[in-house]
Image: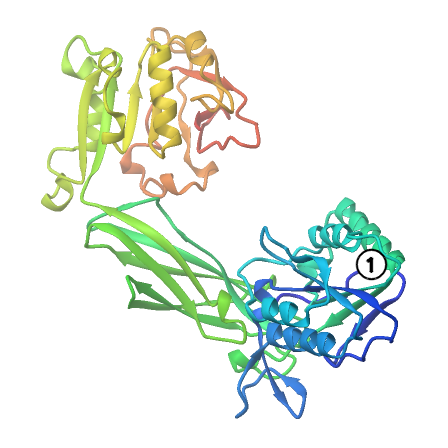
Amino acid sequence: AQDQGAPILGAPFVLFYDDPAVTPTEQLEARICIAIDDSFSMGYQSFERGGVPDRRPPAAQARTLFDRAKQVVRRLVETAGPGDSFSLLRFCGPDRVLIAQPTPSRSAVLETLAALGPTEQPSDALPLAEQLRQVIRLPETPRRKHVVILSDFQRVGWQPTAEEEARSLRAAFRQLGQKGRLTLIDVGVPHASNTAIIDLTADRPFATIGQTTTMTARVRWFGSEDATASHQGTAAGELPQSCELQLYWDGRLRATASGRFDPTREAQVQFRLKVDEAGDHVVEVRCRSDALPADDRRWLVLPVRRSLRVLLVDGRPVGAPEETATFFVARALTPKGATAARAGVIQATVIRDDQLVGRTLSDSDCIVLCDVPVLTGDDLRALKDYVRAGGGVIIALGPNVDAAAYNAAAGPDGLLPASLGERVGDPAQPERVFGFDVGASNHPVLDVFRGNPEAGLETTPIFAYRRVRGADRSDVRVILAYDSGDPALL
């Protein structure tokens, strides 16, 4: 259950019920339009002792907030007048309207209600209000109209942060209140608290056998300051200090780790695992079960490869081997003297740039264009399709590159993230030697070089490079820059 908050509606005749008991409607025939919240927070389990909600499990069986809401609806239908008719809506899913045309059949309403359960979707009051306005007009009738909404009124769904959405929500409920009686029934638990795993990521899209992979889980604690975090064992009024998570690899427990909550009530928990089996593996992280089990687990699928297939496209394939555009890239990917365990991790294949057309690009995990002068229309189409399908393309510039031809492939819908500008420096007559500013970036691709000057990145002399235009766009990230401040790697 996330932070609760009373919705700011401003509609007339708005009533809140803390107790799920519903008084019988007046004896006048009524058109009753019922909307029940089936968002995932309604799966929050409450335990009742003598009719009073409690979060700590006694001997009695747990009931979800959705169970409480369904009980209220059943009472409302069973105690309605003989001439009353009903419509039924739910908060989530594309089929929010379950019964649009009003029906006097109580059994039809109760059967539809019995088949419902909480979903894994968040609540959103604004689309619901729009649907209610449409349903309440069908058909136009002189009957008294009564709109009943049952929810736990989570702040995230009922108090939009955008002012325009908040105004639209208030206006929609104001119009509903003008159509007839509007009743809001709060079935939530006062001062509810919940620990949720809100994200799980790996530090790479796929791993290779023998590689250590870091997976990071983000955990957040939701609740009011005076909430009792009983599921964490803390005293009333205290926030939990830490959380413990378990990581399961293909259903088997592999590791346990913990993290401390920061002032924003979030914690990051990291796991480092060495993978040793190829294939697609299911990684699951679990926290200690609480009253809302739906967000106590998180999954991701991590592909593990025996090797990475890299296609090197040489735009300067003539001359001595060390003069070709791919020579040093191939050496770096498949170095001599590599250990037996790492020797076959990367399989590099070198082709000329005129051999790119007609090649099955999907056979490669990554393609590196090394000083390729121009990209033909067929090249561009093939490379764009390859990238859209999940492939990786690295474009390494050189003296043969035609900037104008490449700029035709730049932009948000193109192959290049930014367009190429003028060349800075002259290798034939160097007036200044440039270097990489490794310390200005925190991108993980540079982690292997940080604090390791012998790796060469921090000491490599650069005599010329090309400026780029458009690197300041919001959808472009500068991974590495020159010490002049110009981007080096996007």
Taking the image as shown, residue 376 lies to the left or right of residue 123, namely left
**Front-lying residue, 336 or 57:** 57
- The quadrant of the rendering that contains the C terminus is top left
Considering only vertical position in the picture, is 339 above or below 363? Answer: below
Residue behind mark 1 = 9
Residue 488 position, x and y percent, is 43, 25
The percent position of residue 406, horizontal first and vertical second, equals 42, 13
What residue is drawn where x is 85% and y is 53%? Answer: 175
Q: Is residue 81 left or right of residue 428?
A: right
Q: Does residue 242 lie above or below 421 as drawn? A: below
Where does residue 273 sit, x and y in percent of width and height? Answer: 28, 58
Q: What residue appears at the point 68 percent right and 87 percent down from the top-left corner?
A: 52
Q: Which of the colour schemes (rainbow, by chain, secondary structure, one colour) is used?
A: rainbow
Q: Could you tell me if residue 216 is visible in this image?
A: yes
Q: Nearer the viewer, residue 172 or 414?
A: 172
Q: Nearer the viewer, residue 475 or 385?
A: 385
Is 229 left, or right, of 17 in this rendering? Answer: left
The answer to whether 94 is drawn above or below residue 158 in the figure is above
Q: In this rendering, would 220 be left or right of 374?
A: right
The residue type indicated by label 1 comes to: Leu
